[in-house]
Amino acid sequence: MLKVDNVSGGYGKESIVKAVTFTVNKGEVLGILGPNGSGKSTLLKIISGILPKETGSVTIDGQDASTYSQKEFAKKVAVLPQLHAHAFSHTVRETVELGRYPHQSGLFSSWSDEDERAVTDAINSMSIARYAENSIELLSGGEQQRVYVAQALAQEAPILLLDEPTNHLDIAHQQQLLDTIRQQAIDKGLTVISVFHDINLASLYCDRLLLMSEGRIARIGVPQDVVKEEAIQSVYGARIKSQPHPELPKPQITLLPDTKEEIKPFTVVKDDFSIAADFVALRTKYPLKTISSAVHNAGMGWYRSFVNRHVDVDYNVDDVKAENTSYLEQQGFHLTDTVGMMTAVTTEHAEVEEYTGDFGTILIAVTAGVGNAVDVSQAFTRDQKPRVGTINTWVIVNGQLPDEAFIQAMITATEAKTKALQMESITDPLTGTIATGTSTDSLLIAATQQGEFLPYAGPITPLGKLIGHGVFDCTVRAIRAYKKAKGWTT
Amino acid sequence: MSKSSVAYIVSAAALLVAVWLGVSIGSVKIPISTLWNPGADATATNILWKIRMPRVVLAGLVGASLAISGAAFQGLLKNPLADPYTLGVSSGASVGAVMTLFFGISIPFLGIYTLPVFSMVGAALTMFLVLGFARLVDRAMRMETIILTGIIFGSFLGSVLSLMIALTGEELRQIIGWLLGSVSMRGWSYITMILPFVVVGSFMLWLNRRELNAMLFGEERAHHLGVNVKRRKFTILIGGSILTGSAVAVSGTIGFVGLVVPHMTRLLWGSDHRHLLTLSFMNGATLLVICDLIARTIISPTELPVGVITAFIGAPVFAFIFYKQRRKGGM
C-alpha cells in the first residue's frame, strides 16, 4: 500500500530524517513515536510531499508518489491538519465540501451526486450534522477537529496521515476522535499513519508502532515490542515503567518521577497498630504499596490505613461492600486511602508481632477463625455458600519489593498458614481431613518501598524466611486463642 | 431559492439601480428612457452616451477590478486588511503609469495599451517585492507585517512619484488630478483600453475560486487537498496585478474599494469564494458608480476626486476590521 524506502530529508542542509525504510499495509494503523526533534513530523511531511526528500522514494499503490499530480495524490492520501486560527470563517458544510476538491475537474467543475454523498457520509460519520450550517470559528477545539476529520474523510482517500490528531483535546475528545478513526479504518479499510506525542494512546490505537530517534528508526513492530522499558528509556531519556493495560493486551507506560526524597525515611513498627473494640487498624505515615484480597480496595494500590473489622457471626447483609464502605466512613477512615477486611473473630484474639531479620523488620497480623475450615484438595465436592469464619493475614515489610517478590510473599505466607493449620490439627468438618484454610481467607502484603531492596520472597530467601516463620507463629497463636475462646481446649 | 441566488439577484439589482442613478443624475437631468428612445432630445442623448455612460461604465469596471482583486488578495493572504491599496500595489501601478508619461514611453506594438501594461508591470513588481520582503521579515506573514510592508513600499513609491512630478513642471496638474483618483472625462477610449485586461484578470481569479477556499486554511492544507499551490498562487497574484494595474492606469489611485466591498459582501453572503469573487465584482462596480455620483454632485459644480469619497468610507471600515481582528486574537 505505502512503501517508504531509504528516505532522507528535512528543512535545511542537514537532513532531519535519515535513511528511513518501512511499509504499511492496507487497513493498518501505524503510529509514529519519538521525542521532540526526532523527525517524526518531518517524516510525515516528506511522505505528504510538503517537504522535499534528498534520497529514497515513497511508493503508493506500486507507483512512485512523486509521479502523481497534486490532485491525483490528494485522491490517494488525505492529511488531517493541526488546529489553527482562521481569518475568515467557512461554515462547517463548506469546510467539509473542500475535501471534494481533488475529485472535481473542468472549468465549471459541477458538483456531482457522488460529491454530495461523500460529504453527507463524512458529516454523519463524525456526528457534526447538527451544526453543519454554523461557522467553524464558533465551534470548540474538539468540534473543529471533528470537522477537519470529516473534511479528510470526504476526500475518500485510502490513506490517511495524521499529525498529533489529539493535540489540545481533552481525554473524552481524544477517545472519541481516535475511536472514530479506528472505526473508519476498519469499516473502509483505511490505511492510517499518525504521529503521536502520547505513547499510551499510540499503543492503544495502533497495530504497529515506529519509534524514531535522531531521524532514524529505533524500533518498529507491534506495541508490545516497541513500548518496552529499555527502548523508551534510552530513546526518550525518561525513567518509565511499562505495565499491561487493564482491558486490552497493549502495554502502557508510567513515568517514574524523581520525587522520592520528598518522602522522609520511615519504618512501620508494632506501635502503629491499634486495637479497638470492633477493629484492628494499622495507620502509617506514608502510603504502603499493597496487594490484597480485601473487601474494600482489593488489588494493588498505595494505602495508609488498614482495617480488619470484626462483625458478628451472623452478619448477613446483601451488599457487603456498600455496608462496609459506610462503616469505614463512619469510623473516620479516608475511603480512597484505606484497605478494609472483615472477620468474625473478636479483636482481642488478633495476633500482631514484629520480626527482625538482617535487612530490617517485618510485621505480621493474623486473626484466625477456623469454624469454617476447608481442605482445598477435597473442596470440589462441596456445594455450600461461604460463611463467616476467616483467617486474615497481613504481612507488612519494611523494605523495597519488586512485583515478583509480592507474589512470592503471598505464596510463602499461604504455605505458612496451611502448615499452622496442620500443626493445630484443624480439620475440614465435612471430610475429616486436615484443613488448608477457610472458605473466605484474605491475605495482604504491604511494603514501605524504602530501605533495603529485597528482590525475592521465596521460602529460603532472607525475607521469605522471616515471613514463613512469622506467619506460622502468629497463625498458630491465633488459632490457639480462637480454640480457647470457643472452649475447644482447656 | 438558495442564499447564493438571492445574493446574485440583489447585487445585480443594486448595480442596475446604481447605473440608472449614475446616468440620470447630474447638472442636467437625463431621463433613463433616452437609452432606448430614438426620438429623445439630442443634447440628452449626447450627454448620456458621450459623457455619463462612459463615466459610469469606467467607474464600474474600475470598482469591479479593485474589489475582485481585493477579495482574492485577502483570501490568498488570509488577511482581511489586504487590498491593492493597503498592499502598496496601487502605488506601484501609479509609478509604472507615471513613468510611461514622464519618459514618454510608447512601445509600438502595444499602442494604446502601453500605459496599462506598464502600470500592470509596476503592480506585479511591487506585489512580489512587498510579499517577498514581508516573508523575509516574518515567516508567519502576520496581518500587521504585510500591511506595514505595504505602507513602507507605498511611501517609498509615493516619494518617487513626487520626484517625477516635481521634475515634469507643465504636466504637473494633469498628473496630480489623475493621482488623486478620478474617472471623469475619460471617454470610451479608456474603456476599450482596459476592458480586455479586466476580462482576463477577473477570469484568472475566478478560475481559482475553489483554490482560494482551500488556501484560506493555509498553503499546507491546500497542498494536502490537492491544490497546486505554487502555480495557483502565481496565477492569483498575476491576475490581481493585471486588474489593479489596469484600474490604476485609467483612474489613478482609488483606495479602499478592494477592502470595503469584499468585507461587506462577506458579512452579507459568507466567505465562499465560489460566490464571493463574482459578488465582489458586481458590488465593487455598484460602490464606485455611487461614489463617483456623490463625488461629482455633493459640492457641485465642483467635482471631488472619487478617491476622496472612497477613503472617507474606507478608512473607518479599515479601522473597524482591524479592531475586530485584534479582538478576536486571530492571525
Image: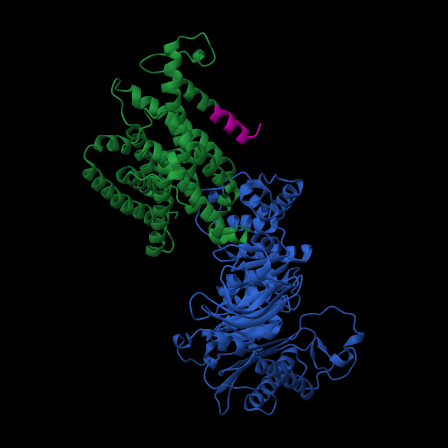
Q: Which is more toward the observer, B15 or A252?
A: B15
Give the colour of chain A. Answer: blue
Quarter of the figure with the N terminus of chain A:
bottom right
Residue B267: horizontal and vertical position, in percent? 44, 34
User: In the rendered view, would you say A365 is above or below A71?
Assistant: below
Answer with left or right where residue A96 lies relative to residue B62. right
Quarter of the figure with the C terminus of chain A:
bottom right
Q: Is residue B2 magenta?
A: yes
Instruction: Identify the image's colour scheme: rainbow, by chain, secondary structure or one colour.
Output: by chain
Q: Is residue A261 visible?
A: yes
**Residue A432 in which image quadrant:** bottom right
Give the colour of chain B. Answer: green
User: In the rendered view, would you say A98 is above or below B191?
Assistant: below
Residue A185: horizontal and vertical position, in percent? 65, 57
**What type of secondary structure mainly makes up the magenta span?**
helix
Q: In the rendered structure, which segment of residues is drawn in magenta?
A: B1-12
User: In the rendered view, would you say B140 is above or below A37?
Assistant: above
